[in-house]
Amino acid sequence: KAGVTQTPRYLIKTRGQQVTLSCSPISGHRSVSWYQQTPGQGLQFLFEYFSETQRNKGNFPGRFSGRQFSNSRSEMNVSTLELGDSALYLCASSLETGVTEAFFGQGTRLTVV
Amino acid sequence: DQQVKQNSPSLSVQEGRISILNCDYTNSMFDYFLWYKKYPAEGPTFLISISSIKDKNEDGRFTVFLNKSAKHLSLHIVPSQPGDSAVYFCAARDVLAGTASKLTFGTGTRLQVTL
């Protein structure tokens, strides 16, 4: 069974640009969540999608957005990139059938210069 | 406002001894707690979890203890092995979130198991 796949693994962008990150969940998983990991801040919840609808949103500015497709694949977009957006962006999928853990992908390392 | 706190950024333990990683939380609405392990350049890997209705859960060398009155949980690894060297994250689910996927994480504890 394939795990959570995130692409690309590494990305370098300049300030002001926008970026789109992709996440393919584990087959059969319908919930996809996104997290930002920065040194000293741990993992911060960005948002969660389930059945193509955003269910939860963390405390991030509107420059951070996402969507989910009918096959449960998800994308997140960051517009007008700032240096502080440099981080590891992690995607997690879960089955959503009661209490269960979330399975993480390897992440996309975004560097804004 | 850090609702899940891991006050020890690092811990060094000798191989074969017990590793105890601690986690404190402030939100009384957390109903489910998880521990994740993370190696560099990889995503977090689920380790063990515990529901708020229990005070202990064991899985092989890993045991998680929950003290609800103190809002404290701990992860015990016995015996510790060099392959356990990683960053350990404590995470909690808010029952109001209504989903297993919105987790609040601590900042992590780096465990180093020495020979």
Image: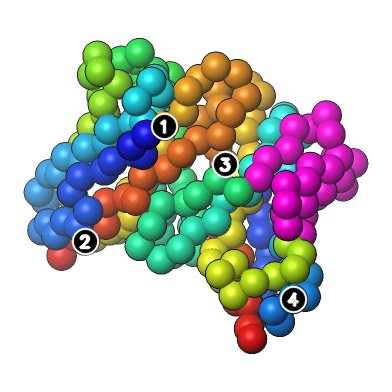
The residue under label 1 is A93
Q: Coloring scheme of the render?
A: rainbow
Label 2 sits on what residue type? Thr
Question: Crowding at label 2, few (<14), some or many (≥20) Cα neighbours within 10 Å?
Answer: some
Q: Is residue B81 left or right of residue B67?
A: left
The residue under label 3 is B104
The residue under label 2 is A111
Q: Are marks 4 and 1 in contact (CB under 8 Å)?
A: no
Task: Kindly report the distance in space between the C-alpha atoms of the residues bearing marks 1 and 3.
Answer: 15 Å
The residue under label 4 is B16
Determine if marks 3 and 4 fall on one subunit.
yes
Task: Kindly report the distance in space between the C-alpha atoms of the residues bearing marks 4 and 1.
Answer: 34 Å
Q: Is residue A80 left or right of residue A59?
A: left
The answer for which chain carries disc 3 is: B
Determine if marks 3 and 2 fall on one subunit.
no
Q: Which residue: 90% across, 41% down?
A: B69
Q: Position of residue A43 (x, y in %)?
A: 47, 50
Which residues make up the magenta segment?
Answer: B48-76
Q: Which residue: 30% across, 21% down?
A: A72
Label 4 sits on what residue type? Gly
Q: Earlier in the sequence, mark 3 or mark 4?
A: 4
Determine if marks 1 and 2 fall on one subunit.
yes
Question: Crowding at label 3, few (<14), some or many (≥20) Cα neighbours within 10 Å?
Answer: many
Q: Which mark is residue B111?
A: none
Task: Kindly report the distance in space between the C-alpha atoms of the residues bearing marks 2 and 4.
Answer: 39 Å
Q: Is residue A78 visible?
A: no
**Relative to B67, is A33 above or below?**
above
Question: Crowding at label 4, few (<14), some or many (≥20) Cα neighbours within 10 Å?
Answer: some
Which label lies toward us, 3 or 4?
4
Which label lies toward us, 1 or 2?
1
